[in-house]
Image: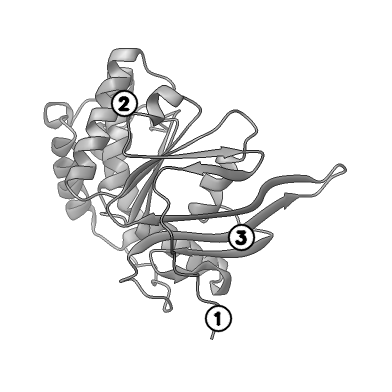
Amino acid sequence: MDDAVPAPAIGDATDAFVARLEDVVKDYPGPPRVRALDHASLQIRTGELAAIVGPSGSGKTTLLQIMGTLDRPTSGRVAIAGYDLDVLSDRELSALRAQQIGFVFQQFFLLERETAVENVANGLIYRGINTRERRELAATALERVGLGHRLQHRAFQLSGGERQRVAVARAVVGRPAIVLADEPTGNLDTRRADEIIELLEQLNRDGVTIVVITHSLEVAERLPRLIRIRDGQIVDDSGITATMPRVAGPS
């Protein structure tokens, strides 16, 4: 598909905070009703590398879904890349997600019979870029993550660490405003997990804003900012500042 998805026409893309959540509540209907997020507030600055850590059931996956525009909050305000999500249509949310957010998942989600280049180029399908340019950008992204020698290898021919590097390349190929990495080391042994964390650190030094969602305190403590979530609430944040701008409501 080469047609460009129109970008949302509102918001301030120059916002210093690439993600801002204010007093966010997320309820899932019952019975019984489940409150997955309980008045959670969080700001991620452009250029940060942060970890959100919490046990199973703490709300971290729901927080990822809200930040990734995969779900809407029950109440509260959310802005991503300067766009107020409350006033966006579903189509505009999809456009924002395709253009401004990169995802890395524990399960990789690669197409097994396609090459590394093809898997990464797939991340640009909804960006209105022609096939040749998508493949060129994909090759560059793979070289960036140390897989320039594996461009034509199919996913099933790659090791776990290499597969996750392909997934990281796919997440950053479109130069999104933020990358959300959900348990990116969960399926890897210690050595390859260390390599992925080192890769994320290098990408961050190159200017990529990254949030890692993890249950592993060991992984979280390696990153510059550590945010703890429990029972749907942000209970500790090593990067919090005294004053944070509020998410603006619709005019």
Which tag, 3 or 1, sits closer to the chain's start?
3
Question: Which residue is label 3 attached to?
Answer: 23
Q: In the rendered view, does 160 fall on the left or right side of 27?
A: left
Q: Which amino acid does label 3 sit on?
A: Asp
The part of the image, by quadrant, that contains residue 141 is top left
The answer for how far apart the CA atoms under marks 2 and 1 are is 42 Å
The quadrant of the image that shows the N terminus is bottom left
Residue 94, horizontal then vertical, whole percent: 48, 61
Which residue of the protein is positioned furthest toward the front in this rendering? 242
Question: Which residue is label 1 attached to?
Answer: 250
Q: Which amino acid does label 1 sit on?
A: Pro
Residue 43, horizontal then vertical, whole percent: 44, 56
Q: In the rendered view, does 127 fall on the left or right side of 217?
A: left
Of residues 148 and 152, the one drawn nearer to the viewer in this rendering = 148
Of residues 109 and 48, the one drawn nearer to the viewer in this rendering = 48
Q: Which amino acid does label 2 sit on?
A: Arg
Q: Which colour scheme is used?
A: one colour
Question: Which residue is label 2 attached to?
Answer: 163
Mark in the foreground, 2 or 1: 1
Residue shown at 40%/69% (left/top)? Answer: 82
